[in-house]
Amino acid sequence: MNQNKIRVRFAPSPTGPLHIGGVRTALYNYLFARNSGGKFILRIEDTDQTRFVPGAEEYIIESFKWCGIEFDEGVHIGGPFEPYRQSERKDIYKAYAEQLIASGNAYYAFDTPEELDALRLQYEAEKKTFVYNHEARKFLKNALVLSDAETKKLIESGAAYVIRFKNPEDEIIRMEDLIRGEVVVNTQVLDDKILFKSDGMPTYHLANVVDDHLMEISHVIRGEEWLPSMPLHILLYKAFGWEAPKFAHLPLLLKPDGKGKLSKRDGDRMGFPVFPLQWQDPKSGETSHGYREDGYFPDAFVNMLALLGWNPGDEREIFSLEELAKAFTIERVGKSGSRFDPEKAKWFNHQYLVKKEDAELAQLYIPFLIEKGISADLDYVTQVVKLVKERAHFVYEFWEQSDFFFRAPEVFDEQAVKKRWKQDSYDQIAELKELLSGIENFSSENTEEIVKKWLEEKGYGMGAVLNAFRLIIVGGLRGPHMFDIISLIGQEETLRRLEIGLHELGKKE
């Protein structure tokens, strides 16, 4: 196939927030398209109007905008194959369903939901499972059993019906999956899926295949959960006489512990998001966390997702979106599920955080300071960020690493006081205060040199004095290099804190 004719799509249903598994599917489609010079399309599959959730489509579009994943065609930007929203294409599907009836590949079925439910209960009582398949269709209410006249009469009378696909009996289907290799299925195990519903709307199966054909989709890259639908879709292409696209079914994203697919419940239970953006359910009002609102950078989020199921073939872990597109191949997507690791997600964010310019991070940090009632100029905040960013995964964590740069401690950590404020601490810190008051050049390097020389001359333990010093300046035993801290807060503020600390902690009897 000509590389320029490669066309892939992401086709979500607007039934709620976008799971990160869906974002990964879209990302792999995007990377595949960019790697091959192809096109990437966003199509909204809203044929099931009963599950439609207001705001979900807008959420999907906003999520990809945040991620930096761009589409070449789609519901929000148009293109040569519009409309890209299935509910706006509903008039075209009936003709294709009728084409399948005319060719003997589909049939009208008039069984009511109540009649089918009763059959299911009857089968359950006999410890069997009811399946509308090649055997069951022989005794049910459909056009394969009824005469042409009876079928016509029912349709003309306005009787509710669906159109079902007529699976071949006892036929072996051999299919090629780009990730899993050959997949072999006997049609004996397949049920006759509904293609067209009584409400005038196609089901996912018919609309999906018709739209993929009409939009000239060359590769269908989708989640593993759609693998059971592959035989039906291959049979539909064959029934229409169309060339089928190539298929690739991606492995599942697995929960961090135990077995099974990653779910919202896992995120709620373990305290991490499973959606790219925050989502508020329009019915319940329940709000779910999003990676954006939880402080993740979009490029870190995308980098993390890319490596959940795909590997570059070497030890590299940090990739820009452009680098991912150059390196990505379907052949390096694994068959088995990928376990999601929330700590690894934080690690990725930390890698991106420390690489960012200090001034950019300071701009992001300032709103958090304003919330705390603190006003500080950009240059000062930038210098603070430079000292603490290695210790944080997220910008919002800067506060717990740097609060003492913006305000003096109001209380002193009790455990630290017990451990580090010794009998001779008061006299030593009083001496240190006197020493610091006489230093003209209060740079970190100069102050450190003078203080260390003084400690040596006095024979004081460096750890004992500097820990007591840190306790007074910071309020506890945390923070970056001590002399970097006092250089930044300045000589006057350092001496003021020492005065207060000596008064508060006093002499230890």
Image (spheres, rainbow, N blue to C red):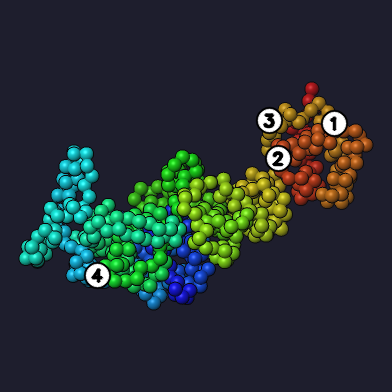
Q: Residue furthest top?
A: 509
Q: Which residue is mark 4?
A: 96
The residue carrying pointer 3 sits among few (fewer than 14), some (14 to 19) or many (20 or more) residues within 10 Å by Cα, namely few
Observer-nearest of 385 and 57? 57
Q: Quadrant of the N terminus?
A: bottom left
For residue 255, above or below residue 278:
above
Q: Amino acid at mark 3?
A: Glu
301 and 507: which is toward the camera: 301
Gap in angstroms between the C-alphas marked 4 and 1: 92 Å
Looking at the image, tell me whether mark 1 or mark 2 is earlier in sequence order: 1
Residue identified by numbered label 3: 414
- Considering only order in the chain, which callout, 3 or 4, is on the residue closer to the N terminus? 4
Where residue 462 sits in the image (x, y, percent)?
84, 36
Q: Earlier in the sequence, mark 2 or mark 4?
A: 4
CB under 8 Å between discs 4 and 3: no
Say whether disc 1 or disc 3 marks the residue closer to the N-terminus: 3
Viewer can see residue 47: no
The type of residue carrying mark 2 is Arg
Q: CA distance from mark 4 to mark 3?
A: 76 Å
Q: What is the spatial separation of the Cα atoms under label 1 and label 2, in whole angstroms?
A: 23 Å
Q: For numbered disc 1, what is the local secondary structure?
A: helix
In the image, is residue 156 above or below residue 394?
below
Question: Which label belongs to residue 478?
Answer: 2
Q: Which residue is mark 1?
A: 427
Name the image quarter holding residue 456.
Answer: top right
Query: Residue 126 at what x, y percent from top left?
Result: 18, 39
The amino acid marked with disc number 4 is Tyr
Question: CA separation, marks 1 and 3?
Answer: 20 Å
